[in-house]
Image (cartoon, helix red, strand yellow):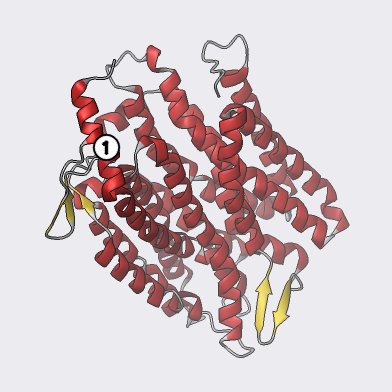
Amino acid sequence: MIDQNTQTQSTTAPPLTLGKGRWLSGWDAENTAQWAAGGRGIARRNLNWSIACEFLGFVIWQLWSVVVVFLPAAGFGYSSSELFWLISMPSLVGATLRIPYTFMVARFGGRNWTIISVLLLLLPATGLAICTANPDTPFSTMLVVAALAGLGGGNFASSMANITFFFPAREKGWALGLNAAGGNLGAAVAQLAVPLVVTGLAAGSLNLPFAGLMWIPLILAAAVGAWLYMDNITTAKSDVAGSLAALREPHMWILALLYIGTFGSFIGFAGVFPKLLLDTFGKGTGFTLGYATLSLAFLGALVGSLARPYGGRLADRWGGARVTMVCFALLATVTLVQVWTLPLHNFWLFLGLFLLLFAAAGAGNGSTYRMIPLVFALRAGSDDDGMGATRKGAAALGLISAIGAYGGFLVPQLLNASKTATGGYAGAFYGFVACYVALMGLTWFVYLRRSSAARLQEL
C-alpha cells in the first residue's frame, strides 16, 4: 500500500529556489514531478561540469607517470628508485585525501568545493613547470611537488559524493559510472598528450615545463564553468556516523581488499606503464609525428577506463562476485604469461598482454564497485547497530574508493623493490600473481561458496 503523503510528493513538484551563491533549496531527486519539470536538466548540467573537473583531477594526478620518463633526457640525474617514488607519491597523497574530500561537499557545497578543488590543481601544474625547468632541482623539492599532484586524486571522492545528491536511486549508477569513467580517461589523455606537447611544441627538443603549463588554461576554464553553471544543494549532508558504522562492518574491509586488487592494479600499472616500457624496450616504443613523439603507454589507461562500465554491466547480468572472480583469474593468468614471455623481448606481445591486464583490472573496477551497495543491502537483516544498510553502503563507497587508491602507491613500490633487489621486475610480477590468486579465492570463499554464511547469490 502506498502512503498518501508519499504519493502526493511524487506527483507534485516542490518549489525550487536558487539563492545567492547558487544555493539550491527544495531539491528532491526522488520526486518524479520535480525531476520531469526541470530537475533532470539541473542534474545533468552539474554532472557535465563535474566530469570536466574530475577529468582534470585525474590528468594532474597522473602527470608524473609520464614526466619521469623524460627526466633523464632532460638532464635530471635521479636514480631509478627515486623515479619510482615520483610516480607513487601522488597516489599515496591522493588516496589519503579522498577520505576528507568525501565530507567537503556537505561542508562547503558541491559547486563551491568543485571550484576550490579544481583551482588547487594550479599548484601541482605550476610547481611541475617550475621544477622541471631546472635540472638542478633537488629530489626532495621534486618529491614535494609530485605529492601536490595527489590533490587531483582526492577530487574523485568529492566529485562522486556531490553527484550522488543530484540523481535519484534509479539513475545513480548511470551517473556515477559516467563520472568515474570521465575521470579515469584523464590518465590516458595525460599520457597521450604530454609526450606530444613536450616534444612537438619544443620543435624537436625537449621542454618539460609544457607538461604542467598546458593544463593551466583548462583548469581556469573548468573553474569558471563550475562557478557559472554548477549548484550547491542545501540538503546535502555528511554522514560521519554512517562512515564510522561502515568501518565496523567486516565486509567493508573485504571489499576494500578486492578494490585494491582491481582499481589499485589499474591506477598502479597506469602510473608505471610508461617507465616499464622504457626500461624493458628502450626509447623505440613510440612513433615520431613530425617533431612530436607519440608514446603507446596511454593505451593501457585508455583500455582500463573503457572496460570499467562494461564490468558493471556484466555484474548486473551475471553477478558482481562472479565477474570479479573471473577478473582476478584473468589478472593472475595474464601476469603469469607476461613473466614467462619476457625473455622473448617481443614488444607487441608485451603490449598486448598488458592491455589484457588493463582490461581485466578495469572490468574488475566496475564489478567490484557494483558489489558494494548490494552487499550491504542484502545483509540488512544482520545489522545490529540500528544503522540502515543503505546508509552504511553509501558511506562505504567513499571509504573503499579511498582505500583502493592506495594500490597506486603499492604497485610502483613493489616493482621498485624488485628492481632494486634483483635488477628486474619478475619478482614483483610473481608477487602480483599470488595476490590475484588470493583475492580470487577470497571472493569465492566469502561470496560464492555454497556453505558460506555470507553467501549472497545475487552477487
Picture quarter with the N terminus? top left
Looking at the image, residue 14 lies above or below residue 212: above
- Vertical order, 30 against 270 (above or below): above
Q: Position of residue 34 (x, y in %)?
A: 25, 43
Q: Residue at x 23, y 20 (%)?
A: 3
For numbered disc 1, what is the local secondary structure? loop
Residue drawn at x 33%, y 56% as measured from the top left:
46
Q: How many numbered tags mark residues here? A: 1
Q: Quadrant of residue 373?
A: top left
Q: Residue furthest bottom?
A: 203
Q: Position of residue 366 (x, y in %)?
A: 55, 41
**Viewer-nearest residue: 254 or 415:** 254
User: Residue 128 versus residue 377: which sits nearer the camera?
Assistant: 377
Q: Quadrant of residue 76?
A: bottom right
Who is closer to the viewer here, 122 or 290?
A: 290
In the rendered view, does 185 fall on the left or right side of 57? Answer: right
> Is 405 located above or below residue 82 in the figure?
above
From what the image shows, is residue 19 above or below residue 36?
below
Instruction: Answer yes or no: is residue 349 visible.
Output: yes
x and y percentages locating residue 70 in the rendered image: 60, 74
Q: Locate the C terminus and report the quarter of the image it occupies.
A: top right
Classify 10 Å Cα crowding around label 1: few (below 14), some (14-19), many (20 and above): many
Residue 445 at x, y = what percent? 61, 19
Whether residue 413 is visible, yes or no, is no
Q: Which residue lies most toward the right here? A: 344
Q: Residue at x 53, y 45 (%)?
A: 407
Query: Residue, x 25% and y 33% (percent of image)?
Result: 10
Residue type pointed to by label 1: Asn
Tag 1 residue: 31
